[in-house]
Amino acid sequence: MAEPTVPAPQADPNADLDVLILGGGVVGNTIAFHLTERGVRPTVIDRGFPLSGTSGSTQAWIWVHTKTPGFYGELSLASADLYRDTLAPRLPGIEYTRTGGLSLLFSRDELARAERLRDAQRPYGIDIEVVGREGVRRLEPHLSPEVAGATFSPHDGNVNPFQLVRRLLAAAQAQGAAYRFYERVVSLRERRGGERRFEVRTDRGLLRARRLVLAAGLWTPELAAPLGVEIPVRPVRGQILVSEPLPPVLGHTLNFMRQMANGEILFGYSQEEAGRDRRSTWDVLSATAGLGIRVLPLLRGVRLVRAFSGLRPMPRDGLPIVGEVPGHPGLFVAVMHSGYTLAPLIGTVMAELLVQGHTSIPIEGLSLARFEGG
């Protein structure tokens, strides 16, 4: 597969575009890829380069079984199945692995809550088994005896985020998508009357688009504001530690830890209200290291090779915001904190919506309209 390139701006920067996507992370790229699979050739603009933002600062779990409410878990399961059945075969090399997932528990009270989760998720087709201390050790022999149990589900897994975005981008480019990197949006205007057009002025010139997709993660609210549209999304920081490569010691994806194909172990799942501050902090990294050793004692003495942090775009209610913006025909939004899990599903339904005007599954519950009236 051809490597993604950084093309020069189009010869006519004022040309009318059919579909313009703002944001070149995993969400913007999955939409572009699925559109090109249906014969549409979108243009994608990104203020930096793909993977320089949230999409490059992640453990990239494909996580299903603890996603609540149930319909959210059901969507996550559908997306995980699309990875297995469609996307991974179509894009070899993304290192998608359905390892099964363990959400660790440390007390008897947590075990009782886990049983309620198991029962609540069953009607949505999500298989969960509650296992005790001995069951956890059978599944993962290297875990500490302090782990009292876990919920286990076969649906969970992980993917290589760098390979996934790179291959989505390359495939979309090969099928006619145009990319414009390191290009900042300066202003955005919606023209009404006749055939509607969105005018997007960047630091390289003016573009007009018949349809506009806002998929810029944390920057989506800022882009939508000039159109009189409020997108209730805030940044939530997460910090992660990376170990030196180790022999295989983890067979499953844990709720805060995974082992990469190269042997590195990634661990950490902090949720911090820190604005747009992406700096790593000693207090959180120290606590993360302590928890890692508590869960996986063999990490004691293992060298750490990297620490990084990322900012999740977190909608007000935690659920994805997807679909056409009410009252603004031709304006679409796709923003969420679970972009890697949902990438195949979001790409599919957004392409359906843009090409045929409706989706194969109901997504009304994800509409921005749910926030109307506060």
Image (tube, grey):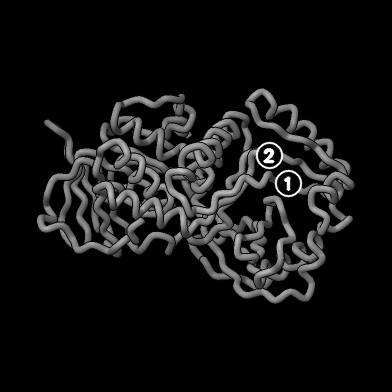
Residue drawn at x 52%, y 66% is: 278
- The amino acid type found where label 1 is placed reads Ser
Relative to 111, residue 282 above or below? below
- Say whether residue 84 is left or right of residue 305: left
Relative to 180, residue 208 above or below? above
- Say whether residue 143 is left or right of residue 14: right
Q: Where is residue 296, by image quadrant? A: bottom right
Residue 154: mark: 2
* Circle 1 residue: 103
Q: Where is residue 295, by image quadrant? A: bottom right
Q: Is residue 372 visible?
A: no
Q: How far is the residue under mark 2 from the one under mark 1?
A: 12 Å
Q: Is residue 297 visible?
A: yes
Residue 250: mark: none
- The answer to which of marks 2 and 1 sits earlier in the sequence is 1
Residue drawn at x 88%, y 47% is: 133
Q: Quadrant of the N terminus?
A: bottom left
- The amino acid type found where label 2 is placed reads Pro
Determine contact: label 2, label 1, CB under 8 Å.
no
- How many labels were placed on the picture? 2
Residue drawn at x 65%, y 65% is: 263
Q: Position of residue 70 (x, y in %)?
A: 62, 30
Q: Position of residue 243 (x, y in %)?
A: 66, 70
Q: Nearer the viewer, residue 262 or 299?
A: 262
Q: Position of residue 35 (x, y in %)?
A: 31, 40
